[in-house]
Amino acid sequence: MARIRILTDSTADLPADLARQLEITVVPAYVQMDGQSLRDGEQITRAEFYRRLPTLTDLPTTATPSAHEFAQAFRRLAGQADEVIAILLSASLSGLFNAARLGAEEVPDLRIHLVDSRQLAMGLGWQVILAAEAAAAGASAAEIVHLLEGARPRIRILALLDTLTYLRRSGRLAWPRALAARLLHIKPLLGFYEGEATLVGMARTRRKGLARLMEMIAALGRFERLALVHTQAPDVASFRHMLSTIFPPEQTLTSEVGPIVGTHIGPGALGIAAIIAA
């Protein structure tokens, strides 16, 4: 039976203990702030990043790992596995997938399967977890890739942002710039599906925003997996209690969104990443 290992990038926002438990290799992306280039998850903590973010004059920028860094990660796995499945940040958002492809070409002796998650944060993270669990259970690479293809259309991310400011300043999307003036004091609700972020709702207060968010979550139906995702939001505990009414709290994962995505959505965001039951 082929030995299969799973690799991803740090935008998956996997809890570190879970990544270790499932033997998932995580290649860090970079956040550049105050003249420093910092490896996500290694050289800056989430708490420090969100504490400093509102004080910065210039918004941080993000950078992908190099092809060489991916090649190094693949070479380290070559002695541990016959095949590697690399599940990565949506190619529509970043050059990271292409960097992994170039890195894989430097390690021709290892069979590497590259998978575009078409997701970010725990939308990517859930695919990585599914793959690692299946690999541990003895599934083949083809079976794992097929599993991911079946799960991907059922993955949803919904989130309430505390402000539109960071999305507008990042310039990554056109509609936040167009709406910024009239949405200055509005709490936007975002959805992310199959590589595209959309504005799915608006609220005048955070309380109303959370109520609308819960309505949207409940309308998705039954869940196979559910993660609470946040960017140092102050009301994580109360939101976790709300979610406990629709999904077992002991099965709900909590993921703090890292600097790569957090740069664009800012502190105080709160939401879910879910796999809808088939």
Image (cartoon, rainbow, N blue to C red):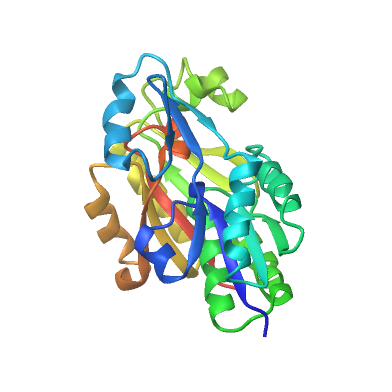
Task: Work out whether 168 lies above or below 135.
Answer: above
| Front one among 24 and 255 | 24
| Quarter of the rendering occupied by the C terminus | bottom right
Residue 36: percent from left, percent from top: 41, 25
| Front one among 265 and 63 | 63
| Quarter of the rendering occupied by the N terminus | bottom right
Residue 41: percent from left, percent from top: 39, 45
Residue 209: percent from left, percent from top: 36, 40
Residue 64: percent from left, percent from top: 58, 37
Residue 218 visible to the viewer = yes
Residue drawn 36% across and 66% down? 252
Residue drawn 32% across and 37% down? 268
Task: Work out whether 105 lies above or below 19.
Answer: above
Task: Work out whether 181 lies above or below 46.
Answer: above
Residue 211 appears left or right of 121: left
Residue 232 visible to the viewer = no
Residue drawn 60% across and 68% down? 79
Task: Work out whether 235 lies above or below 130.
Answer: above
